[in-house]
Image (spheres, helix red, strand yellow):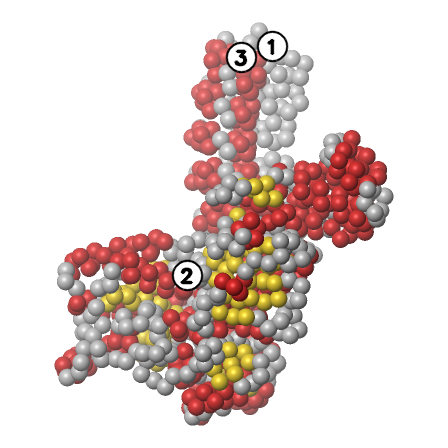
Amino acid sequence: MTTAKLPDGWTGLHYACRGGYDKVVELLIKNGADINVTNVGEGDTGLHKACWRGFDKVVEMLIKNGADINVTNRRGWTGLHYACEGGHDEIVELLIKNGADLNVTKADGWTGLHYACWTGHDKVLELLIKNGADLNVTSAYGDTCLHEACREGHDKVVELLIKIGAALNVTNRNGDTGLHYACLRGHDKIVELLIKNGADLNVTNRKNKRPVDVAAGLGRDTQLLLETETRRQVEYSELVSSVGSEEGTTVKLFLCGDGQVGKTSLRVILKKTGLIVGALWKIRRKFRRQDVFNPTPGVHVSSKTVRGIGRLSLHDFAGQAQFYVTHAMLLRTTNAIFPVVYKIIDGEEEQKRQIHGWLSFIHCSNTDPTNKPRIVLIASHADKLQGHEAGRRQATALVEHYRKLFQESLIVSSEVFLINCLEAGSAEIQRLREVLAAYRDDILKQRPRVPKVCVQLSETIEGWREERKTFPVMGWQDYLKTVRQASSENLQERIVQLASSYLHDEGEIIYLHREADSSVVLDPQWLFTSIFGHLLAPDNFPIVKIARTAEDHVTLEELTRVFSAVADIPLLIKLLQEFQLCHTYGGRTFILPSLLQQEIEEAAWSPVSSKAVYFGLQIRGRTEIDSFSCDLFPRLQTLLMQAHPKKLSRPRLWKNSAKCTDGKAEALLQITTDKRQLNIVVRSNDGNREDCNSIMDLLKDMTYRLLHETSPGARSRDMVLSALDLREHRPQPHAYSREEVEAAAAKGGNLVHPQRKVPEKVKDLLLHLGSLKGMLGRVAQKRPELVETLRHINPILDHLRADDVINLDENDRIRAAKTPQDAARELLDILEAKGERTCVKFHSVLKTCDKFAASLIVEEEMSEEGATAS
């Protein structure tokens, strides 16, 4: 009786294995049950059923009693396929230990590895790879396991695949890579991971589409990252193909740290090598006061071959906060080493504030997602320590802490340095030189080859600097003409533009290609020291400084007084405007937002009409290491001024705040002092949410583009501000995550304010319901078209009422509307308020009653063959 079968081939063993009844299985086996018998329909054995349902004790018992581990059913599935799909890692491990074939494929070419990646089971993936599964095996359609993980949005699996060496650029039969799938499905984290790890962004599929061309539903910062990196890869290839490339030889050394920590002293003693030079330095020190150096105004730049390190371009950054706006322009260079200097004699919290601030600044300024800037932490003023060992323990703890905190974005040296920045020949300084030399060699080995046209142009510009010391600035047309005259090649204007942009990114020149006749600054040090040094210097700097009016503005007369000896004043003003550092309405008085000191007064954003509606967006750093560059908000304030009068009225500006209006709605923009959160609040005094749309769209686009330009390394996330808090003008409104809002929208429910325990409707929070995923988002996106299309609404209402989607009162309200458009608007208001499931039912009704309307909100499927192969 133990081998008795039903007509469909099922035995008692099949049922016992499927149900996980290990005692029954044991009894059946003892009484002679056929372990490998298959049923009729699927061809499954008991092992298939036990693996599918995840019963490890049953699987272990079957294996011990001789079950065929690699038997396939009619669809080609083994027990391993089922276990991998279900994420049953203990069973996978059992099967592997007992000799399961890890690379057996079904008819469609899928292995267990494909299923583990498709379903997102990272533990199963690790087991399979550890035991020799083929990482890059392709299905019949040409998909690797990376394709499947990318398509389904399993970022942890993708990260693991990358770490263990999965090929990133494999294309399937349609020509798609994993990145194509991730872009098409809107998986932000996976897109960022693939870009960061060097995926080819310009692979085209059979429809000649690159990943950027098929992207849909990505977050704004991820979309901009994808667009920027795609363009950068194209431009680099174009430059290299024009006249070739060669190895780079110079690395920059950016000395970072707050004011008066010893950076300038360190810069000097790094170059004091050899016994004689070191001895002369010690003698010189004896006859000078201890604080030898005046503070650096702006940035001091010098190039030298330092013995023991190699060719370096040394940049000594002023550490005062007033200069951070301009430091950001240079910190976006990729071929640099960043020693970060802090005082070991400061309190522990102050040390952490300084180090964290600079590391976050460097991280958020990194323009190359495939590059990790190299950091050396240097504790200065070691000679003033009371207890040297205690100081070393503190410095060691800081190094370990920040190595771990920034491990995903920065390479922080494990070496601990306690240095007297006035002691040229110390063992610590010699060890520092060795670490810097190793970092320099590492950068040069990993650095992409430099386009030859950029090398030639850089050498030519070096000579021009000598000729134009007074005002080393050229207009584009003059610059282009001079470049062509100096070159033996017949250079096209686009190649000169790309080469100049490359040199700008390397910090060799300053070239902002924003308009046809943009300026080119041949000598960045002149700009940062002679101009910005005087323009932004704090009061305690012993140099000529700009005087400001009571409103923190600067007059033309004052600019002329300070800069007439070193600059052409009209060209200087044009330059500052190109950098988005200043604006003028009449040509006599200039507003430099970074100089503003006045805080916003409470009356500037006070309660208005009781009918007013408020909506708010918060853009915040995604993690504790993400912050926004110091030049983001001042430049955003400049853009607001430049938008007057065409798009906005003249804005009111304060330190860290701005208020503007487009004549229909008002907006308040504010950034926190730690530069980690930026709020955009809009309101309509008449209660018209449509009036809020246009100004919010304008400000969001302006902010995100500038955020990506100024803080390319920082990752951000959108939060939705509490409308309740905004209406009551609470100073710190609560921010809901997008996930919270989308979950509430899907259920047709409310969000509950966590502090005040008051419910808030999704529609009161979200200005754009169309930004939601799913059917609710598509209904909101197509709202204008649906309002015009739904002219015969009664049959639709009958179906919705019969299916209990709307109640009697809602039905009557809709039918009482004066026009078909009003009825459609009322219906859509009700549906949107009820959420995702209600909108799905609405779409189902439309497919019966109004097929054209249904087609407007149908989900766009992947057109590629095999997109639904799984």
Marks 1 and 3, how far apart at CA:
9 Å
Q: Residues within 10 Å of mark 2 (few under 14, many from 20)?
A: few
Residue position for label 3: 33
Vertical placement of 744 versus 716: above or below? above
Residue position for label 1: 4
Labels 2, 3: front one: 2
In the image, 199 versus 376, the foreground residue is: 376
Labels 1, 2: front one: 2
Q: Residue at x 77, y 40 (%)?
A: 813
Name the outermost residue toward the top.
1
Q: Is residue 452 left or right of residue 420?
A: right
In the image, 397 versus 538, the foreground residue is: 538
Q: Residue at x 29, y 58 (%)?
A: 349
Question: Three-letter amino acid code at disc 3?
Answer: Ala
Q: Is residue 241 left or right of residue 564?
A: right
Measured as percent of width and height from the top left, residue 695 is found at: 63, 63
Measured as percent of width and height from the top left, residue 804 is found at: 74, 31
Vertical placement of 189 versus 244: above or below? above
Residue position for label 2: 674
Q: Residues within 10 Å of mark 1 (few under 14, many from 20)?
A: few
Q: Residue at x 59, y 14 (%)?
A: 11
Name the outermost residue toward the right.
792
